[in-house]
Image (spheres, rainbow, N blue to C red):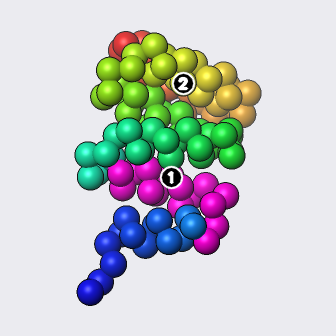
Amino acid sequence: MEKSRREVLEEYLAASPNDSFVRYGLAQEYLQQGEAAKAVEQFQELLRLNSSYAAAYYHLGQTLEKLGRLEQAREIYGQGIELTGQMGDLHARSELQAALDLL
């Protein structure tokens, strides 16, 4: 029997728990499967391990919004805006600001 994408990502992550790309992919897979709470856990751990992974701020904020955790989403967007501003990533910063403005 062939392994699912989720199973493969979970195996990769078990072998390399600090791999930001794999953790991000697993969080996205959880989202696609309707497991937002698990996705939040993965995004939070990703940011704990690699606070400069800009895309995680946006997707964590979006996931928190879906869960009705709006104040936490605002906080995450704010952190992402600050980080991307420091990094000079104006595109990511503008996406985060737009998401925050919609709340």
Q: Quadrant of residue 18?
A: bottom right
Marker disc for residue 24? 1
Look at the magenta stretch and give its main secondary structure.
Answer: helix
Amino acid identity at mark 1: Tyr
Q: In the image, residue 40 lies at what x, y percent?
A: 45, 38
Task: Kindly report the distance in space between the C-alpha atoms of the residues bearing marks 1 and 2.
Answer: 16 Å
Residue depicted at x 68% and y 46%: 49
Marker disc for residue 56? none
Q: In the image, residue 82 lies at what x, y percent?
A: 66, 22
- Whether residue 19 appears in magenta in the rendering, the answer is yes
Q: Is residue 71 above or below residue 96?
A: above
Left or right: where does residue 66 sit relative to residue 86? left
Q: Secondary structure at mark 1?
A: helix
Amino acid identity at mark 2: Ile
Q: In the image, residue 17 lies at what x, y percent?
A: 63, 61
**Residue furthest bottom in the image:** 1
Give whichever of 101, 72 is nearer the camera.
72
Marker disc for residue 76? 2
Give whichever of 87, 42 is nearer the camera.
42
Left or right: where does residue 48 sit relative to residue 76? right
Give whichever of 70, 55 is nearer the camera.
70
Considering only order in the chain, which callout, 2 or 1, is on the residue closer to the N terminus?
1
- Res 4 visible: yes
Q: Secondary structure at mark 2?
A: helix
- Whether residue 36 appears in magenta in the rendering, the answer is no
Q: In the image, residue 10 lies at what x, y percent?
A: 47, 65
Left or right: where does residue 78 sit relative to residue 50? left
Q: Which residues are magenta?
A: 15-30
Q: Is residue 25 above or below residue 102?
A: below
Left or right: where does residue 30 sit relative to residue 24? left
Name the quadrant of the C terminus: top left
Residue depicted at x 54% and y 18%: 75
